[in-house]
Image (cartoon, rainbow, N blue to C red):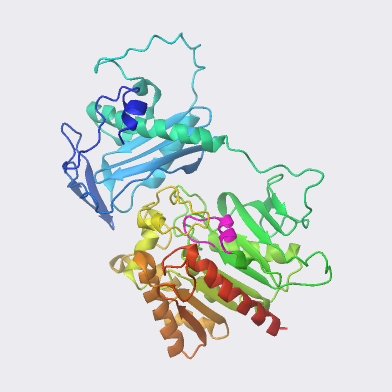
């Protein structure tokens, strides 16, 4: 923190910006009042959050800088971050060419944050028409001690939508509060936006199978990432989802040498905050006895067709994308064995839910399913809370125990309503969708009567301590229904791998997959 003073706060003249001392427990005065609350049905309840208690030193509460990607409605990309304390919420973004915008509200809903409205306001600001900037004037000599009442440069350069904040004092406070974020984001964005891209394919580049558009998917020309002839990523668009989405494919080494052979397929579903490149953290997924496909599942897609389609995420029909588009697209373009006996779905964390849900929704597609540390019992409030945490972009412990195979966790994208994915999570307001898709319900588990089911979990840490409960519930209910299953609770991980501590990381999932994939390959072989 001390380094921010000479590098950012003092040069920008942010006279009213500071950091709390270890003994401070409230927002310093004077300050515009902030209100925090929640919406229950059509009612909102508010509390004055201006004098909220700060976390005790060492309490584990913290804040980290990270980059979120924003698609602008006028085209192009911006990078930024959001932040919140009780009573206040702000978002800031910066484009590569220097446009930047910030928005802040002093009416912060703890749940049901109006993320879609704020996101629309924020991303529209850099697209507004602007007059050409005048030629820059010669820079004046720096004043070593600028007076505090001197107009701040950040107040002239930062765009803030005032409609969400009332009062001139609050407007100035918002500018000063967000200017530091804008400056820090601009520094990081410059690196992120100018980073080197993957080399373009040349004459000596590896050759991959030719894919034809279809099943509602359109390939983005020139966007394929070819690492080798057996490891490549396609980028596609679909009306079912906003933006572009990647599909990574691992082919067996003998795919080209045996042109008459067809292969079984395993679909790997990554966790929340992850992406298709997470699969590289589990080498066992590259097996010469099968094709492995890793489709994008979004930062918080939850492998579902969302209840709300008008959030900051836009169109979000992930289940349709995967089951009705990606699966037939792969079968149409690669030499697969297109039957349930030779098709499996495997996932971890958020993807563990997705795998079990997809196997239950489409038992005609998948004859094998595996869930690793999955959020697979929506009857547990802790599992529902995990979904809400991703909707509200509450990183905290979830990023500390990152599901990203790259080791990075920059958040879960735009904040959306807590009803966005599965509707209301509260029984009193009809949690019908949560119950309908709950993988642990007896009705849904009964759909796995003819499916090979495998569950893995540790039991250590904030997250796997709960996935162990969820997985145990599912295994017990499968046993109750007389459905065979293999349940591996590796506890603290010592029996699985020296690197595994029984928690929510690839240090456990990589060896768990190394245990599972050979078994899966044998089951594929036995299917004929």
Q: Is residue 137 above or below residue 251?
A: above
250 above or below 60?
below
Front-most of residues 306 and 461: 461
Which part of the image, by quadrant, shows the N terminus? top left
Q: Seen from this angle, which residue lies furthest front?
A: 498
319, 521: nearer the viewer: 521
Residue visible at 32% across and 68% down in the picture: 381
**Quarter of the image containing the C terminus?**
bottom right
Whole-percent x and y of residue 451?
57, 82
Q: In screen coordinates, is 435 left or right of 212?
A: left
Residue 336 magenta-drawn? no
Q: In the figure, is residue 264 to the left or right of 446?
A: right
Q: Residue at x 37, y 34 (%)?
A: 181
Res 66 → quadrant: top left
Residue 406: % across, % down: 52, 54
Q: Which residues are magenta?
A: 270-282
Above-or-below relation of 198 to 330:
above
Camera-side residue of 341 and 166: 341
Q: How many marks?
A: 0
In the figure, is residue 254 to the left or right of 413? right
User: Which residue appears at 44% of the width and 76% of the height?
Assistant: 490
Name the foreground residue: 201 vs 354: 201
Residue 422 visible in the snapshot: yes
**Residue 56: percent from the left, percent from the top?**
20, 50
Please provide percent x and percent y for residue 461. Answer: 35, 66
The answer to whether residue 419 is seen in the rendering is no
């Amino acid at each position: 923190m001390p380094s921010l003073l000479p590098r950012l706060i003092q040069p920008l003249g942010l006279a009213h910006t500071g950091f709390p001392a270890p003994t401070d427990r409230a927002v310093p005065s004077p300050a515009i009042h902030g209100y925090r609350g929640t919406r229950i049905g059509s009612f909102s309840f508010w509390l004055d959050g201006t004098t909220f208690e700060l976390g005790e030193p060492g309490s584990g509460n913290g804040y980290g800088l990270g980059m979120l990607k924003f698609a602008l409605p006028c085209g192009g990309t911006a990078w930024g971050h959001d932040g919140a304390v009780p009573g206040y919420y702000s978002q800031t973004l910066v484009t590569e060419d220097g446009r930047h915008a910030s928005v802040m509200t002093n009416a912060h809903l703890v749940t049901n944050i109006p993320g879609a409205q704020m996101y629309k306001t924020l991303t529209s600001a850099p697209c507004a028409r602007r007059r050409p900037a005048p030629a820059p004037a010669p820079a004046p000599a720096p004043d070593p001690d600028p007076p505090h009442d001197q107009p701040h440069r950040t107040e002239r350069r930062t765009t803030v939508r005032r409609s969400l904040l009332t009062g001139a004092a609050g407007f100035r406070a918002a500018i000063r509060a967000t200017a530091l974020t804008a400056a820090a984001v601009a520094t990081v964005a410059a690196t992120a936006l100018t980073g080197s891209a993957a080399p373009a394919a040349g004459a000596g580049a590896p050759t991959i199978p030719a894919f034809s558009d279809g099943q509602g998917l359109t390939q983005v020309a020139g966007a394929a990432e070819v690492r080798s002839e057996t490891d490549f990523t396609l980028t596609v668009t679909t009306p079912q989802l906003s933006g572009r989405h990647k599909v990574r494919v691992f082919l067996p080494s003998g795919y080209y040498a045996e042109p008459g052979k067809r292969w079984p397929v395993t679909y790997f579903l990554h966790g929340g905050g992850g992406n298709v490149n997470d699969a590289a953290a589990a080498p066992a997924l590259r097996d010469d006895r099968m094709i492995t496909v890793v489709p994008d599942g979004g930062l918080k897609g939850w492998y579902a067709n969302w209840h709300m389609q008008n959030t900051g995420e836009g169109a979000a029909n992930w289940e349709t994308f995967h089951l009705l588009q990606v699966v037939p697209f792969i079968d149409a373009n690669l030499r697969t064995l297109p039957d349930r006996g030779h098709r499996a779905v495997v996932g971890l964390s958020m993807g563990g839910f997705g795998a079990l849900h997809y196997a239950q929704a489409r038992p005609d597609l998948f004859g094998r399913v595996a869930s690793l540390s999955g959020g697979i019992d929506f009857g547990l409030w802790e599992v529902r809370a995990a979904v809400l945490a991703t909707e509200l972009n509450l990183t905290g412990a979830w990023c500390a125990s990152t599901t990203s195979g790259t080791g990075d966790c920059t958040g879960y994208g735009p904040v959306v309503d807590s009803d966005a994915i599965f509707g209301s999570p509260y029984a009193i307001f009809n949690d019908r969708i949560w119950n309908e898709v709950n993988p642990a319900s007896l009705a849904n588990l009964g759909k796995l009567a003819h499916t090979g089911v495998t569950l893995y979990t540790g039991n250590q840490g904030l997250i796997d301590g709960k996935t162990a409960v969820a997985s145990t519930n599912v295994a017990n209910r499968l046993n109750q229904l007389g459905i065979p299953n293999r349940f591996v609770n590796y506890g603290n991980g010592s029996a699985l791998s020296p690197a595994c501590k029984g928690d929510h990381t690839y240090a456990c999932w990589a060896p768990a997959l190394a245990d599972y994939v050979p078994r899966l390959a044998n089951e594929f072989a036995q299917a004929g």
